[in-house]
Image (spheres, helix red, strand yellow):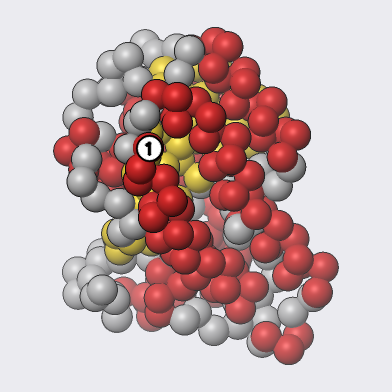
Amino acid sequence: MNFTDKVVIVTGAARGLGQEYARQFARRGASVAVNDLRDCGETLEIIRQEGAQGLATKTDVSSSASTAEMAQAVVEKFGRIDVLVNNAALYGSLHFAPFDKLDEKEWDATMNVNVKGIWQCCKAVLPTMKKQQSGSIINISSLAATYGMPNGLHYTTSKAAVIGATRGLARELGRYNIRVNAVAPNVVNTDATGEVFQDKKDKIVEVTLSQQAIRRPLETGDIVGAVLFLGSEHSELMTGQTMMVDGGTVFL
């Protein structure tokens, strides 16, 4: 897949999956704008090492002002926005517990970033994509939304909302030739996953694999193909869909 002359935004790109999405779009010729509340300097350097143009901004995806500034900076530098990957989410920093023991402030923060953040970023890129009469928005959901992950109702609920938002946005934006799809991965071997499960990680991976049809742990590279496909011309008539990348755990 070739993304030459395309402009891609990846949110939550300071590390992990977001950083890998940025790398792979850059490798295929895209100009890539990355943002996070963390420093994206390392990701920006990776983009440049791939021979692509890059832009890094510090962005709070839950803020309309911050996301609007980000989108404006991208258009000022590159002139257009072709793909938005809504990857930013609270995950690694969350505390997982039975639903009645979850902290209310953490619940609100999860919804603010994981759900409201997608809404804000979509609003920010809409004027440009609407003017172009083209664009692809890719929302990152999770197996948790369809499987029903216990002891993480804040995260599970937020990722289910991502699927609902994806479907609603697809209906609204199709008239402008803007496609909206979601990718829902299983547990992926990232730093954030280690932070969530800590010393229970090996056991969680063991249980996860026992429920997969293909019993191999997911790595960051396993998710990239689906994101690239949804951002490319090869998926021009796909919208409102959720692609499960879970080794065959849930069949939709």
State left or right for residue 27 relative to residue 45: left
In the image, 77 versus 1, the foreground residue is 77
Q: Quadrant of the C terminus?
A: bottom left
Residue sitting nearer the eye, 166 or 105? 166
Give the quarter of the figure containing the N terminus. Answer: top left
User: Based on the displayed image, in which of its 4 quarters is residue 202 positioned?
Assistant: bottom left
Secondary structure at badge 1 equals helix
Q: Position of residue 117 (x, y in %)?
A: 63, 49
Quick check: 142 left or right of 93? left
At x 28%, y 16%, the residue is 4
The amino acid type found where label 1 is placed reads: Tyr
Q: Is residue 81 above or below residue 10?
A: above
Q: Residue at x 37, y 37 (%)?
A: 176
Q: In which quarter of the image is residue 123?
A: top right
Determine the residue positioned at 28% across, 23% down.
3
Relative image position of residue 192 (x, y in whole percent): 56, 55
Residue 130 vs 101, above or below: the answer is above
Point out the residue furthest to the right here. Answer: 105
Query: Which residue corresponds to mark 1?
Result: 176
Residue 88 visible: yes
Q: Is residue 155 above or below residue 71?
A: below
The number of callouts visible is 1
Q: Residues within 10 Å of mark 1 (few under 14, many from 20)?
A: some
Q: Position of residue 22 (x, y in %)?
A: 43, 31
- Quarter of the figure with residue 91: bottom right
Residue name at image x 37 percent, y 11 percent: 51
Could you tell me if residue 14 is visible in this image? no
Please state the horizontal and vertical placement of residue 158, each as a whole percent of the image. Answer: 58, 67
Q: Which residue, as the protein is rendered here, is positioned at the far front?
A: 175
Q: Which of 227 and 115 is in front in this view?
A: 115
